[in-house]
Amino acid sequence: MARPLKFHDFRKIMKRFGVGLRQSRRKPTHWMLVRDIEGVRYCYPIAVHDGQVKGACASKTRRHFKLRPEDGVTDEEFYGK
């Protein structure tokens, strides 16, 4: 199970893998993650509450953007040290 992350740390991790973030105009607690993979644009919304991204949301985001160990990105590489 993935651990919850501070939004600042989550944003740095996503940026390292080429995932951009756009804030929702309607809800300031919601962000849209965007990444182009092999010419196809993938988007995924996340909710941020109290400056935290839930662990389940982080793992679903990894799956959606193909950043799991099965896709060649280890946990150590994803989370850093």
Image (tube, rainbow, N blue to C red):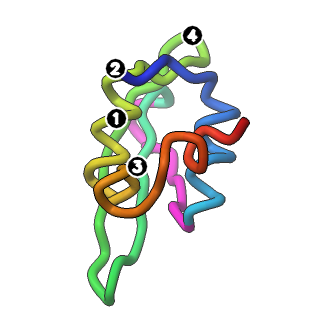
**Numbered mark located on residue 26 in the image:** none
Tag 2: amino acid: Met
Q: Nearer the viewer, residue 50 or 76?
A: 76
Q: Residues within 10 Å of mark 4 (few under 14, many from 20)?
A: few
Q: Secondary structure at mark 2?
A: loop
- Region in magenta: 18-27
Q: Nearer the viewer, mark 2 or mark 1?
A: 2
- The alpha-carbon separation of the residues under discs 2 and 3 comes to 23 Å
Residue at 68% x, 34% y is 9
* 19 horizontally vs 56: left or right: right
Task: Tell me: 40 left or right of 10.
Answer: left
Mark found first going from the N terminus, 2 or 3 = 2
User: Where is the N terminus found, in terms of image quarters?
Assistant: top left
The residue type indicated by label 1 comes to Ser
Q: Which mark is residue 50?
A: 4
Residue that numbered label 1 is attached to: 59
For discs 2 and 3, the disc positioned in front in the rendered view: 2
The CA span between labels 3 and 1 is 16 Å
Residue 66 at x, y = what percent? 32, 60
Where is mark 2, residue-wise? 1
- 56 magenta-colored: no
Residues at circles 2 and 1 in contact by the CB criterion of under 8 Å = yes
In the image, taking residue 10 as reference, residue 58 lies left or right, namely left
Q: Earlier in the sequence, mark 3 or mark 4?
A: 3
**Mark in front: 2 vs 4:** 2
**What residue is shown with label 3?**
32
